[in-house]
């Protein structure tokens, strides 16, 4: 059963990954990438890594790819022009792909990598929460690398914001505090007037509307 | 009851048919509540604006939503001539499927939940963040300026408010120590003061307001602001395709209301629990009634907001999300950390000694 699910999603994953590269429409490419993320999340869940699997969907599909799509839709990308150099880089691409395939093949088929020294991982019981397990190692054993990664991300955020901060002369911005602090008494004058009491005499010369 | 029906079937069909029956048992009431919510919305807003609301179809107008559904289903689905056909038709489904799939992990009563998974809250967060794809793709595939503008607004808004929502949920996680929604509710057992709304009051506010923004409801409904961009992302949709968007929006409203009730107001727990006299009667027992009651209250708030507040301007929405809500949640997470450390109240007593 597990292997049927694995092959099903693995095949879709590879098909989606090919779709990312080959589709002519950049919006389709982004959507194929979403599909690819989804399928790899399912594969992770098959490996009992449900926290990582769901986080992959949450972060990459739910946030990163939304922004990607956002940009792709706003830009008028001419894919044909981008693809002009496709054949020119072909030899290098094939070389890299071949290297990756050989390396994976070496690990998978050539079993003299010391794999037999490591015991086969056992399936955890149903109650096992790998969120907790992950948190325990992340905040004790790997707390410094974790904090380091956090600081690097913070630096990236600050850098991105500073790049877009420009003080343009003559920019009209609203000061919300000023707006909230506005006193209605100094802006609106309420005048109490006596209501009209007498009815107007009918106009001579018939009805008018 | 489900087990009784399932036991008639042959052995090999039982697991599958049990799951299917559970799904029907969740979705059927959900879709009916969506129908009744549209009626309720029109009645409530009508009375708030000194009108009658629908009152022609059936007694008190109660059959109005069914008349609306029949009308929408028999209408023609128009395809704009320059629309991307495939994405245009798939977009409503992409919105609807996550909106319904989320309900798999929602515990309705202490016993009834379709899928009692450990990472339930994460699953909810991941799936609710997918609904935006339908909005963006629908807006883009329509090939219309208004639709595209609506889609862009919606995308930026949802990304902004998701962060505040996620941080508010981190607060709930810190209080409950579990990602399982059932365990989160069980962690609030005791009395009305044991519920998380009190220690997490700012997060509770931020979560519910972000939820209103996330579902594109007034006063955050710039994605479909009628007075600015006609109907936003679904301006080109008609008939059944429009009905799917509509169904997804209302299902999401019910979802946000139910989640708020579960995480901050104790879900199925009774407010009379722990009170001497009333608490011992049936009113003190936890049941689905309390969950529906609390959900109904938040749904009423959704409608109340819509009838009360004028629409936010787009830059004000962004300011509220990024510059107000996110700082509030981050500061409150620190405060909560101190409360956990000092074992404040009944909420954080379960954490071990100060180490």
Image (cartoon, grey):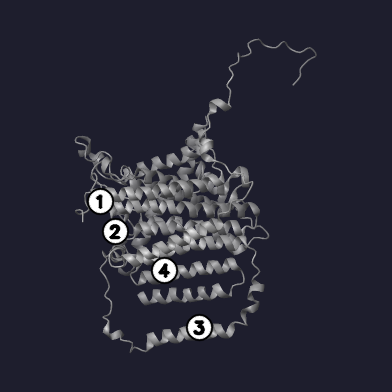
Residues behind callouts 2 and 4 on a single chain: no
- List the residue tagged with mark 2: B3
Badge 4: few (under 14), some or many (20 or more) residues near its Cα, within 10 Å?
A: many
Q: Residues within 10 Å of mark 2 (few under 14, many from 20)?
A: few
Answer with left or right where residue B288 lies relative to residue A178.
left
> Which of pointers 2 and 4 indicates the residue nearer the eye?
4
Chain of the residue where label 1 is placed in the rendered structure: B
Image: A189 above or below B110? above
The residue carrying mark 4 is A41
Q: Secondary structure at mark 2?
A: helix
Q: Residue furthest right?
A: A205
Can residue A172 be seen at all in this image of the molecule?
A: yes
Q: Which residue is mark 1?
A: B341
Question: Position of B169 compared to B145: left or right?
Answer: left
Residue placed most toward the observer, A114 or B209? A114
- Dot 3 or dot 4: first in sequence order is 4
Q: Is B308 rendered above or below residue A67? A: above
* Mark 3 Cα shell of 10 Å, populated few (<14), some (14-19), many (≥20): few
Label 4 sits on a secondary structure element that is helix
Nearest to the eye among marks 3 and 1: give it: 1
Residue B63 percent across, percent down from the top left: 49, 41
The residue to which callout 3 is attached is A97
What separation in Å lies between label 4 and label 1 (alpha carbons)? 35 Å
Marks 2 and 4 sit apart, C-alpha to C-alpha, by: 33 Å
Mark found first going from the N terminus, 1 or 2: 2
> Nearer the observer, disc 4 or disc 1?
1
Asked if residue B32 shows in the view, the reply is: no
């Amino acid at each position: 059963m597990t292997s049927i699910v694995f092959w099903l999603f693995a095949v879709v994953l590879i098909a989606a990954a090919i779709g990312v590269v080959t589709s002519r429409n950049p919006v389709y490419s982004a959507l194929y990438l979403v599909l690819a993320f989804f399928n790899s999340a399912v594969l992770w869940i098959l490996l009992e890594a449900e926290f990582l699997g769901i986080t992959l969907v949450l972060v990459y599909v739910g946030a990163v790819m939304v922004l990607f799509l956002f940009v792709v839709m706003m830009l008028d990308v001419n894919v044909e022009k981008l693809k002009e150099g496709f054949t020119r880089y072909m030899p290098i691409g094939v070389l890299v792909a071949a290297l990756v395939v050989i390396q994976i093949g070496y690990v998978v088929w050539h079993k003299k990598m010391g794999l037999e020294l490591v015991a086969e991982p056992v399936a955890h019981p149903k109650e096992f929460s790998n969120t907790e397990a992950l948190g325990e190692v992340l905040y004790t054993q790997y707390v410094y690398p974790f904090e380091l990664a956090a600081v690097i991300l913070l630096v990236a955020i600050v850098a991105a914001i500073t790049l877009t901060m420009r003080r343009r002369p003559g920019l009209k911005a609203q000061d919300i505090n000023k707006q909230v602090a506005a006193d209605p008494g100094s802006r609106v004058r309420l005048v109490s007037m006596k209501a009209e009491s007498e009815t107007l005499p009918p106009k001579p010369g018939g009805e008018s509307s | 009851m489900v087990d009784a029906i399932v036991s008639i079937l042959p052995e090999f069909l039982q697991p599958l048919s049990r799951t299917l029956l559970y799904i029907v048992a969740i979705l059927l009431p959900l879709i009916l509540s969506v129908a009744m919510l549209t009626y309720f919305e029109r009645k409530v807003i009508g009375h708030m604006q000194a009108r009658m609301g629908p009152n022609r179809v059936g007694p008190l107008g109660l059959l109005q939503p069914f008349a609306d559904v029949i009308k929408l289903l028999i209408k023609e689905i128009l395809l704009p001539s320059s629309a991307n056909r495939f994405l245009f038709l798939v977009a409503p489904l992409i919105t609807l499927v996550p909106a319904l799939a989320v309900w798999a992990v929602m515990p309705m009563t202490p016993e009834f939940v379709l899928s009692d998974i450990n990472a339930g809250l994460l699953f909810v967060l991941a799936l609710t963040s997918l609904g935006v794809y339908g909005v963006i793709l629908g807006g883009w595939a329509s090939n219309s300026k208004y639709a595209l503008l609506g889609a862009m607004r919606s995308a930026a808004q949802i990304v902004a408010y998701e962060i505040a929502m996620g941080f508010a949920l981190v607060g709930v996680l810190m209080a409950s120590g579990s990602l399982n929604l059932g365990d989160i509710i069980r962690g609030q057992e005791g009395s009305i003061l044991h519920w998380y709304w009190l220690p997490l009051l700012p997060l509770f506010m931020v979560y519910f307001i972000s939820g209103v923004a996330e579902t594109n409801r007034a006063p955050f409904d710039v994605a479909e602001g009628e007075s600015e961009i006609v109907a936003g992302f679904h301006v080109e949709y008609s008939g059944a395709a429009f009905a799917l968007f509509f169904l997804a929006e209302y299902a999401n409203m019910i979802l946000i209301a139910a989640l708020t009730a579960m995480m901050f107001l104790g879900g199925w727990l009774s407010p009379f629990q722990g009170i001497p006299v009333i608490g011992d009667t049936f009113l003190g027992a936890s049941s689905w009634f309390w969950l529906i009651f609390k959900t109904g209250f938040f749904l009423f708030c959704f409608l109340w907001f819509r009838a009360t507040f004028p629409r936010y301007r787009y830059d004000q929405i962004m300011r509220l999300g990024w510059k107000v809500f996110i700082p509030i949640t981050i500061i409150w997470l620190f405060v909560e950390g101190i409360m956990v450390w000092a074992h404040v109240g009944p909420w954080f007593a379960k954490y071990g000694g100060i180490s």
